[in-house]
Amino acid sequence: MEFTIKQIAAMLGGAVKGDSSLSINMLAKIQDAKSGQIAFLSNPKYEHFIYETKASAVIVKKDFVPKKEVRSTLIMVDDPYSSFTVLLEEYHKMISFQKEGIEAPCFIGENCTTGKSIYRGAFSYIGSNVKIGDNVKIYPHTYIGDNVVIGSNTILHPNVKLYAGTVVGNNCIIHSGTVLGSDGFGFAPQEDGTYKTIPQLGNVILEDNITIGANTVIDCATLSGDSTIVRSGVKLDNLIQIAHNVEIGKNTVIAAQSGISGSTKVGENCILAGQVGIAGHLVIANKTSVGAQAGISKSVKEEGQRLLGYPVLDVKEYFRSYAIFKQLPDISSRLKQLEQKLAVAQSALKSD
Amino acid sequence: MEFTIKQIAAMLGGAVKGDSSLSINMLAKIQDAKSGQIAFLSNPKYEHFIYETKASAVIVKKDFVPKKEVRSTLIMVDDPYSSFTVLLEEYHKMISFQKEGIEAPCFIGENCTTGKSIYRGAFSYIGSNVKIGDNVKIYPHTYIGDNVVIGSNTILHPNVKLYAGTVVGNNCIIHSGTVLGSDGFGFAPQEDGTYKTIPQLGNVILEDNITIGANTVIDCATLSGDSTIVRSGVKLDNLIQIAHNVEIGKNTVIAAQSGISGSTKVGENCILAGQVGIAGHLVIANKTSVGAQAGISKSVKEEGQRLLGYPVLDVKEYFRSYAIFKQLPDISSRLKQLEQKLAVAQSALKSD
Amino acid sequence: MEFTIKQIAAMLGGAVKGDSSLSINMLAKIQDAKSGQIAFLSNPKYEHFIYETKASAVIVKKDFVPKKEVRSTLIMVDDPYSSFTVLLEEYHKMISFQKEGIEAPCFIGENCTTGKSIYRGAFSYIGSNVKIGDNVKIYPHTYIGDNVVIGSNTILHPNVKLYAGTVVGNNCIIHSGTVLGSDGFGFAPQEDGTYKTIPQLGNVILEDNITIGANTVIDCATLSGDSTIVRSGVKLDNLIQIAHNVEIGKNTVIAAQSGISGSTKVGENCILAGQVGIAGHLVIANKTSVGAQAGISKSVKEEGQRLLGYPVLDVKEYFRSYAIFKQLPDISSRLKQLEQKLAVAQSALKSD
């Protein structure tokens, strides 16, 4: 997986200044880069690094003029940051899609279709009536239930579990141990204190360009025809709970160990930090940002708020109140003193 | 999986009014139901829905007299809600117990007994000396260690893991990735700061009618002969932690990502919301209700309390205090003003 | 797995007083022990138990002189507690390392080396270029990616997942469903609100004597050559999240459902209770003790602190403030009263 600087420059449509025959095998930050690696310089604030870096190549703006000697080969482009991002993506694809072919033993049911360049690891299980696109990588111990549909260029890491009827789009990455489509948590209380299980008949739909971490769980929707939906571009971390009938809006990012209760609709471009909890049947506005361990118990209607605490407050309000929380013993004793002093003053007044 | 209204009425012992030949393939709420679905009307408050619903059939009280035209076929019974519950259960069983037979390859050790109508999915693993009842469904990648005992009509979804010695009752449902019987977290601190592992020799026992979600973990008890016990009718959601030697009382319901520490005994008919934590060696009274993200650090002795916060308070008390918490900056500045005013008043008094 | 008291005494270098031919099959506390079990008496406070215990043998100090009749056989040693600990360890090893040999089917790639006394359970997967030491126990459904290195005497319980490049030391125990080496949660925000995936190229390194519970996740480091590191002697419970580039110091213990965000360095001999969260890029001093559900948002510089709350305070401070938090409605109304009284007093003063 090595490229010459010449090949990379061609990929980016950039001009080369320096030795274009050097090999590049890795991407790095300009301050950390070593020989054999490529970095970029976008923000002029970091210009001093280019005179010290050990990177074999640096992507720079096409009008960049060095003030001192630069040892690295330069690739001159319109927008160094977006060019670097292109490289990141290409590199990511290359390392992720290496596996190909079918290892034995593995299992496939009846009436399935699979695309080109597929990888089916040993002990992977594919049920019946499953449709799988091109260039899908199914690692060992992965379980794909009946009637599942998977788009192209999607990676299922070892031991992903897709219950029957799950739909996964294109360019998705799902990490080990993650479960999609387990039963929603629905029980009908009976008079004798027991609960009857309510059949969970819906499914889970992931749109495109979604990444899900390890050991996360997304439950299916309750009713047949309904879905728990994760919209395009969503990024979910590890050990997250997404309950039945939830919808996560486009490009929302959720950090590890957060949980969303049933039927809640999280907006687009939200950011939830770790260990956040959101109650059921709520609507969370777009661009909401929720701090770690916060708990949301009411819908968030205004876009772009930053929230913290349980139940959540505006993050600044929370910290202002918490600053006083630390002083509560002092406040309590000052209050007592005031009461005593006032009593003294009052009796002085009366005795006047 | 379709039935005629006639067949359903016979199952419920109800009389039919309307076309009994229509096919039903799904259950739904009366306000959401579509053609081909069956709903029920129990609460008179919802009567107006029966004149608008698209349900092919509605289960009603046998003395129900429509005030307007009803397009749906009616099934007249004594108690519509409990009849609907019966249908739910029947439907649930039918869809859950479809799989049957043995897929290859799968593994079974020596000296095992398995009942009738079993399903053993490909890549499932059964150790030695295992006893399995009738109508048990073991999905692919499930691991059943040595000496495990499983009752009848129990479903182990893909990749459930039962450590050696685990006991699972009848009519249990365990979802993907859940682990029963992993080692309790027990270590003996040594003088040099290291820890020695304390062998964990007990097991996990699930009684009957228990449902457990995905990626939940229940540790085994520490001592041989002891058990971590989940009593009949308990419903556990996803990603829950149940530590060694815990006991969960009958019909208790625990939502996702909650954790119970070692040796704690949770009562019957309790309800724990999501992300709740309970410390070790406590006793929680029956019918305790704990709000999301709450933390319990002392035993709860009085039954039927509703708790919130860390450590928990009565839920109303918590909200009353939290309402003031939000105003703390204001309270702090008012206190300062009072101190200043009182100082002024005092000096005025003195100067009198 | 039974030993005579004679054999155990020889192992511990102790003298026997009583019947040395009795068989022992289990270790227990002196107050709980039954026939066939062995206990120890170290603290004189518990001496009364030795006159009642049903233990077949009790390990005592060599100068112990019973004041009443003792039915158990005594094993006289220098230090009863450390002798018992030795037994615990031996017992633990015996029960943990019983499995041996290769079950079929299982998978192994090219160019692997495996040591003596290995167990490879059915459906276990070993990739290419893997190096595995002696006496390693690989339970069914375990996944070991390419280029993984595993030391000796390490146990991988059913369905552990080690991504390519993971390094595991000697004497480690990893429980079911745990994932090492999944991608760190790294995404580059784009102008259009989408995120590009940053390739995660580092690995996870576990040193020696580490225990990890079930369904825990440790992400790999971001850059090639970098590692997420767990130092010797660390004990991690179930359902824990350890993000990319984290380092956990020697002999640190972390309870279930806690999460450590990216690039944070936790010191040695720390104790984290359950459901704790630590933000990213922090340094936590050695011997820090963190209470359940606490959240750390700043580095902890002073060693040996006990912390609680969100964000954390000294545990005593937290409880002092929380005690007043409960009284906030009272404090608020007392403040109002004071304001009214002072207003009255002031007008009295003015009217003077």
Image (cartoon, coloured by chain):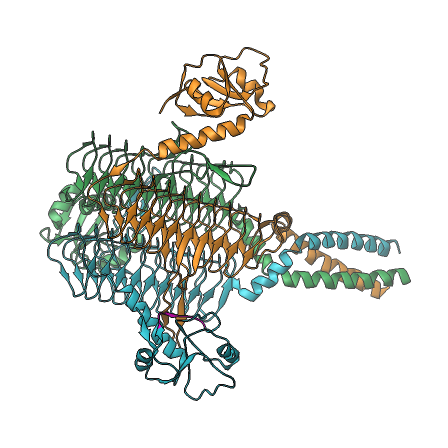
Chain colours: A orange, B cyan, C green
The answer to whether residue B119 is seen in the rendering is yes
Tell me residue C330's x, y (percent).
65, 63
Residue C137 in the magenta stretch? The answer is: no
Which residue is drawn at the image coordinates 70% and 54% (left, top)? B330
Q: Horizontal and vertical percent for residue B300?
A: 44, 65
Image spot of residue B124 (x, y percent) = 21, 52
- In the displayed structure, B133 sits above or below C184; it is below
The answer to whether residue C63 of the structure is visible from this angle is: no
Q: Residue at x 37, y 31 (%)?
A: A94
x, y percent for residue C191: 56, 37
* In this picture, residue C331 sits left or right of residue B38: right
Closer-to-camera residue (B43/A240): B43
Seen in the image, is C19 located left or right of residue A128? left
Q: Nearer the viewer, residue C122 or A139?
A: A139
> Taking A234 as reference, is B13 above or below it?
below
Give the magenta range.
B24-29
The one nearer the camera, B222 or B88, is: B88
Q: Quadrant of residue C62?
A: top left
Number of marks in picture: 0
